[in-house]
Amino acid sequence: MALADSNNHFVLLVLLRWRLFANSLHRPSRRAELGLRILWSLLIGIFILVTSAAFFGLTLALLKTGRSELLDIALLFILLIWQLGPILFEGYSPGLNFREVARYPISFRLYFLLTVAYGASDSVAITCSIWLLCMWVGVLVARPDLALAAAFAFLLFAIFNLLCNRIIVGLFERFQSTRKGRERIVFITLILLLTPQLLQFSARAWLNGHAFKLPSSLLPTLARVRDLLPSGLTAHIFLFEGPNALQAIAGLLLITGFIFLLLFRQLRAVFQGEIYSEAYTVHRELTVRQGWQVPTVDEVTSAIVEKELRYLRQNSRLILQLIYPPVVFLLLIFNGPVRKFPFATKPSGLLAGLAGFLLLSLPNLSYNTFGMDKEGFGRWLLSPLPLRKVFLAKNLTHGGILTLLYLVVTAIVIAVAHVDLLNVATVTVSFFAVLILQLAAGNLISVYWPKRIELTQMNSKMSSNAAGFASLLVIFPIMAIFGLIALAAWNWQLSWLPLVLGIVLLAGGYKLYSYLLDRSVAYTYAHIEEISGNLGV
């Protein structure tokens, strides 16, 4: 009670986060999600432990072997993860909207400090801080005489990253507040996601001598740029002595001060009530366009399909998640070393890999099928439509999108790799069998663990944590079944066996889909208030 009555705003902020979390556990589905989140936290903890040991060992090895000039590369890696991690893994960022906090009667100074403190609680920020601590421990063990200077340098480096991250997160939130901004941000995020693959291919080509080599005159310029980056200045603070160290301190302080002023200006505008909105277009007369008519389906189903596609078009992140797998897969196809093994001798493996990549993106669509409806979920229940038909139309839309992507990229693969028709038929039948099973599981998971999707919030995930783990429980058994089928066909030399068993699985998947669809509809009607609460609040 003493904490609850505290006048300390930071304590109240922590209590607010705890109260939001505790209230969410009152629902049975949330308790199941808590158990899965604990398991996920354990896996994340193991990852942090391993990577922290790697940073400690790397720092120790570089200092012991006299290669301390390479420490700035490790710091540059931390800088990139700190700045880009909350964006690429936005669903794991803290979710409080500080525009709401700005409405309360608090001073701007307090608002600024609360925003920065909340950014420090980001999981990526905590992880990067642990990595910096492990690097400092490595410096302390290898070179105790540099430990004090390194502590100051790493602290200043952490402050720079924290302030810079708040600016970047604020910019992305500003972009996502409008539809045009969300559409523009798709391209930027796609480039960020493809950068690791492009760097990997470029490095491999560079080592093989096939890449374009920079003129030797540019190498000193690149080295100078590397020294002027915040990571290079941080390393120079404790690795250099005398005037060079003072210049590095002055440089890092100057950059940090500039970032501070930018963040101050950004938060001041928000605190004073700056609002981002769509540009208003004046229409002289109202025109009504005729709705779509999807071939082979009735008008009601066509209307639902049109509504789903229009909603999906507004969700830039979901579009990105759908585009990313085939783009990355095509990059892997046309990368020289990958084409030599194993796809050159087994083109069917290429096609199967494509199908697998696409199916892995299906849970983003079908495992939270009412997420973008939000309060509109209640309208489905008030309409005279059977809820079963709503599920079917949504599944038709989601399955149709993946089928179209599969057919387009399959045509490219067939043209490049000349896949045997038997293998094409086998992979295609298997693709549709898994697609039906995923849609069936997605219907049930969507009503068991529904989650509201906020298009304007960067931290809004496409599905709940429980849905993400449930997708693994669906995918792993399917992979095991198809692995056994492939092993049996290879062992007995029966090339037709996967196609026959794929048809059997397709028929069985259709029966299972019908059964789980009825279960999903029945569960929805029995838990209307719970589902509406998750989607509407």
Image (cartoon, rainbow, N blue to C red):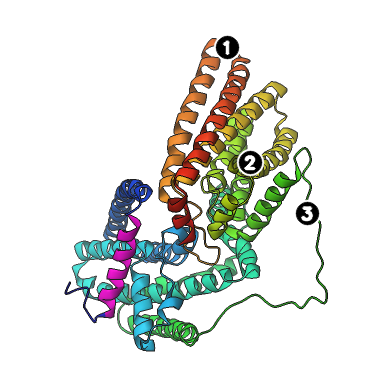
Q: Residues within 10 Å of mark 3 (few under 14, many from 20)?
A: few
Which residue is pictured at 56% across the width and 38% down the height? 439
The spot of residue 55 in percent (x, y) is: 32, 57
- The residue pinned by badge 1 equals 493
Name the mark nearer the viewer: 1 or 2: 2
Q: Residues within 10 Å of mark 2 (few under 14, many from 20)?
A: some
Q: Nearer the viewer, residue 11 or 113?
A: 11
Task: Indicate which disc, 1 or 2, sits on the residue closer to the N terminus.
Answer: 2
Q: Position of residue 11 (x, y in %)?
A: 25, 74
In the rendered structure, find residue 291 and report the number of the disc placed on it: 3
Please tell me which residue is depicted at 39% across the width and 63% down the height of the picture: 78
Q: Position of residue 474 (x, y in %)?
A: 46, 35
| Quadrant of res 357 | top right
Residue in the picture at 68% in, 56% down: 310
- Residue 360 in magenta stretch: no
Say what amino acid the circle numbered 1 marks: Gln
Work out how far the residue at label 1 is from the one at label 3, CA to CA, in angstroms: 52 Å
Q: Amino acid at mark 2?
A: Lys
In front: label 1 or label 3: 3
**Residue 214 in sight in this render:** no
In the picture of the structure, the residue carrying the numbered disc 2 is 389
Q: Is residue 225 above or below residue 273?
A: above
Report how far apart the C-alphas of labels 3 and 2 lie in the structure. 18 Å
Of mark 3 and mark 2, the one earlier in the sequence is 3
Seen from the viewer's position, the closer of residues 55 and 299 is 299
